[in-house]
Amino acid sequence: MAETSITINDVVFVVDCGKAKETSYDALNNTPCLLPSWISKAAARQRRGRAGRVQPGECYHLYPRSVYDAFADYQLPELLRTPLQSLCLQIKSLQLGSISEFLSRALQPPEPLSVQNAVDYLKVIGALDEHENLTVLGRHLSVLPVEPKLGKMLILGTIFNCLDPIMTVVAGLSVRDPFLIPFDKKDLAESAKAQFSARDCSDHLALVRAYNGWKDAERQQSGHEYCWKNFLSAQTLKAIDSLRKQFFSLLKDTGLVDKPSENCNSRSIDEHLMRAVICAGLFPGLCSVVNKEKSITLKTMEDGQVLLYSNSVNAGVPKIPYPWLVFNEKVKVNSVFLRDSTGVSDSVLLLFGGNIERGGLDGHLKMLGGYLDFL
């Protein structure tokens, strides 16, 4: 609050702890982080400026002058704090040459490992070839105003004629979570969300069902009641609805959709197909599932053991009947947490995951450099 542009007239005291939870990027583990860190001098001045904005006030900084003197002058630029996949894709689409060479000329260039991680990711999803040239998929992804993985999901939704639910998933992952968890009604809210999951281990399919239910309720003039009963944000659902319309219009304008809407959705009730398209879009965001007697162990290739956010339909269940979860995002707080996950089978992963290689000696099918090994 103290660093926003909001002015509250009767606030005359500000207590500044000197800390903030800030997004950063761990290139070594290829993981976004959200960890407490010291603020910058510019942020400290901004916090001080909130005290007595319209009348005399006081600001108390809870750190010594020596700590303040060690603060950076300004926050690190976003180029150094976030993954670079979308930026790298735009560099190639604008024909600006080598990605690493172009970014090395920035005023504050990102770490070479961060750039390499982004390039490797774009190769894995098929947006770049081995020589860092744009593929046909990459050219289409570069004109879609969403993350590459979400753009790939949209394109596959059109190809497999299940566009409507996939647009809902992509729109839902592009805005805030529509499922509300009030502090004093946490159990009721989680139960309401669980009813949309149908025990199929998918946050994404739960979102599709919640949105479809809201659209039905809107047609009956009872959308507000539906949201109140199911702990859903009407504002977020309206934002999802608006984004869906934008996506469909853009797909038509770019020629990715050249058939009537009903043809694009002839398979939209096939939830097995939806799960496969979600897998194809979110890969290589993947973790293994090991069901134990009293717990479930989840592991990713880079991080080892990870956890699910408590608001996931897969959190707290006694068993996940799938060997893998694909996820939209992972964030390191104190541990690494996964957000928005869907269970997938070995066969779905083999058919809709990344490139498959055959082992030279054992003849096994391998993916992700041998991390995934199928007999």
Image (cartoon, rainbow, N blue to C red):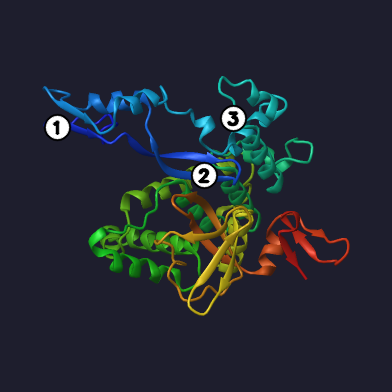
Q: Secondary structure at mark 1?
A: loop
Q: Quadrant of residue 273?
A: bottom right
How many residues crowd mark 1 within 10 Å: few (<14), some (14–19), many (20+)?
Answer: some
Q: Nearer the viewer, residue 189 or 265?
A: 189
Residue 278 coordinates in the image, percent (x, y): 58, 58
Q: Tag 2 or tag 1, which sits nearer the N-term?
A: 1
Give the percent coordinates (x, y) of residue 329: 52, 51
Image side of residue 90 versus residue 293, left or right: right
Which of the two residues, 46 or 40, is positioned nearer the viewer here?
40
Callout 2 touching callout 3 (CB < 8 Å): no
Q: Is residue 264 above or below residue 375?
A: above
Give the residue type at disc 2: Pro
Height in image: 117 above or below 91? below
Q: Quadrant of the N terminus?
A: top left
The label number, if any, that marks residue 11 in the structure image: 1
Lateral position of residue 59 relative to residue 18, left or right: left
Which dot marks residue 110? 3
Regarding mark 3 in the picture, which secondary structure is present there? loop
> Alpha carbon of mark 2 to alpha carbon of mark 3: how far?
14 Å
Q: Tell me the amino acid under the disc marked 3.
A: Pro
Examine the rendered structure and indicate whether residue 220 appears above or below residue 284.
below
Residue in the image at 37% along x and 54% along y: 178
Q: Which residue is mark 2?
A: 32
SS state under label 2:
strand
Label 3 Cα neighbours within 10 Å, binned few <14 / some 14-19 / many ≥20: many
> Is residue 339 visible from the viewing direction of this image?
yes
User: What's the residue at 48%, 42% (across, down)?
Assistant: 246
Q: CA distance from mark 1 to mark 2?
A: 34 Å
